[in-house]
Structure formats: structure tokens, C-alpha cells
Image (cartoon, rainbow, N blue to C red):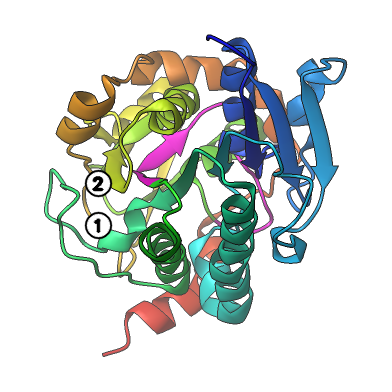
Amino acid sequence: MNGARPIAVVTGGAGFIGSHMVDVLLAHGYRVRVVDNLSGGRIANLSPHKTNPDLSFEEADIRDIVPETSLVRGANYVLHFAGIGDIVPSIERPIEYMDTNIQGTVHVLEAARHARVAKFVYAASSSCYGIAATPTREDHPIAPQYPYALSKYQGEQAAFHWHRVYRLPVNSIRIFNAYGTRVRTTGAYGAVFGVFFKQKLAGKPFTVVGDGTQRRDFVYATDVAEAFRLAAETEKTGEIWNLGAGDPQPIDRLVELIGGPIVYIPKRPGEPDVTWADITKITRDLNWKPRVPFEKGVAQMMAEIHNWRDAPLWDPESIKLATKTWYDAMSAE
């Protein structure tokens, strides 16, 4: 890059995708400032760079960021990943999700506006589409099915409101099914990789929802991070891109790659049979394409399966209890 080395702020930079974003930015010669409240307890994700003078870290909640904060002053780009996820907790604690994912985003937007950054890139969610037609294009109707999806979509709406009213340069990427090393593991029932890896370690059968033929558009975390870098550096602004691998994989294929017995549990309401990003637009606009094949990505995660040794162990009965709120809410007419 010509001239002074660019500075990027990564909110949620100690988390799953955020930490991969840090890796990519440092590899491309950026100076990086990470803002994270460590609610996921994953500061270890940044340990490879702990002596790197180009990386700084600030433990802070995005809801506490003030417009004039020094965290963003002088930055070229803000890549906004901070927020809270998972379906069931969002149904149980909607105020917390709205407060963090919407109001927290507004705090970061205001800091970016006051710092006059060259680009704000928002990490949106494909869950905004609900049960979508596939392949799913960016102009698909919006139909959030639960508070997490709604909060992420309204955070995106806030970002584009700042774009229109305050002329803040904003792009948004709607991520489909991101996976990879460092994927988040919480006490909540959630991401299939954490569930299956713990079951593998414990020698228990995989709890496959439905009949296992449902497909997900899994996209590897390093590919996601590269897309965000390109979305920051492009001259384009005011854009929304869908981001997946564009090649949905059956859950049965994931089970086959990990290896082990299966027990089937009932299909859940509000879940699509297929998620599938139409990646025509992001491929054309950013010259981006997925580089990590599914088999390679799963193998890279399996090489670090020990990282899931402290994850919760789920079985059909505990999953039924954990998802009761989900069933009650999503089955309501």
C-alpha cells in the first residue's frame, strides 16, 4: 500500500470471525485496533500477535463507546463484528439483544462518523431473510424469524441510515453459515460444529436435526475475513453483499467427515431446509471467491478438536429442554 500504513478498528476482534479479521489485516500491512468486551472469554484468539506492535487491544463494551473516543480517532476503516448471537437466548432475552446489536452499533457508528473514517463495514446476518428462496439474492424480501435476526437487521438499517443522513461510507455483508477454527462455544445450544465436536470427544452419537439432508452454505472464516477487507478497501459504498461459499453442504456430509454414530432429533420450526447465498454480486463487485473447500475447512477444525473439550455435551433430552422456548415461540400462530 502507498503512503502511511492504514489503521483498521475491529470491534469484536477477539471473537471468532473478528480474530481471523485481525490476522488478515496484519498480514496485509495494517495497524489494527481491537475493541472487545471479552464476553466470549477468547483473548487467546489474539495470542499469536501479543508482541506485535501493530496490534493494540482495548477491553470495552460497544455500548459505552462515546463519539469522540480515541479508539477510532485517526482510523481509516471500522469493521464491526461486535454483538451477541444465538437464537434461543435472543428469544429469552430480547432487550439485551436489541440493546447490544442495535444501540451498540449506533455507538460505533457515531464514533466512526466523528472520526471521519473512509469506510464502515457492518457484519450482517443472512438470518434477516427468514425462510428464503434459494439461491438467495440481496433483494430477497426481509422476514426475520426471531429477535437475534431482527436485531442484526435493524443494526444494518441503522448503518445505512448513517450513510444516508451523515454521509458515512458504509458497506454491509450478510454472512451465511460461517465456520472455522476459533468458532464460538457457549453454554447455549447453538452452532452445529461445537455440538458435534464435543459429542465426538465424548464418544457420543451426533444429534442430527431432521433427517440430515438439510443443507447449509458453510463459508470458512478466513474467506469471510478476506471479503470484509475487500469491502473496506473498495471505492464502492452503500452496498449490501451476500456471503457464502455458494455450495450448500448436507449435514450428513459433515457427519461423514467427522465420523461417528448418529441419533436423529425432530426438525425445528423456523429453520430452513437449505441456506444458499447467491454470491454473484460479491464475486463481481469485489473479485472475491471462496478459497477453502469444505473438506479442508473441517479437517483444519478437526486438527484443533481439543479446543472443544470444555464445551457443553448435548443429548436429545437436554436439547429438547434447551430449545423449548424456541419451539414455543416459533410454533405460535
Give the spatial CA distance, label 1 vs label 2.
7 Å
Does any portion of residue 204 appear in the rendered image?
A: no
Asked if residue 7 lies left or right of residue 86, the reply is right
SS at badge 1: loop
Q: Amino acid at mark 1?
A: Pro
Label 2 crowd (10 A; few <14 / some 14-19 / many >=20): many
Q: Are marks 1 and 2 in contact (CB under 8 Å)?
A: yes
**Looking at the image, residue 289 lies above or below residue 114:** above
Asked if residue 234 lies left or right of residue 101, the reply is left
Q: Position of residue 146 (x, y in %)?
A: 40, 72
As drawn, the label of residue 272 is 1
110 vs 263, nearest the viewer:
110
The residue tagged 2 is 275
Label 1 crowd (10 A; few <14 / some 14-19 / many >=20): some
225 vs 205, nearest the viewer:
225
Determine if the magenta segment contains residue 177.
yes
Q: Position of residue 305 (x, y in %)?
A: 64, 24
**Looking at the image, residue 70 lies above or below residue 34:** below
Q: Which residues are magenta?
A: 171-189
303 vs 244, nearest the viewer:
244
Q: Position of residue 124 (x, y in %)?
A: 42, 51
Q: Position of residue 13 (x, y in %)?
A: 67, 38
Asked if residue 196 lies left or right of residue 177, the reply is right
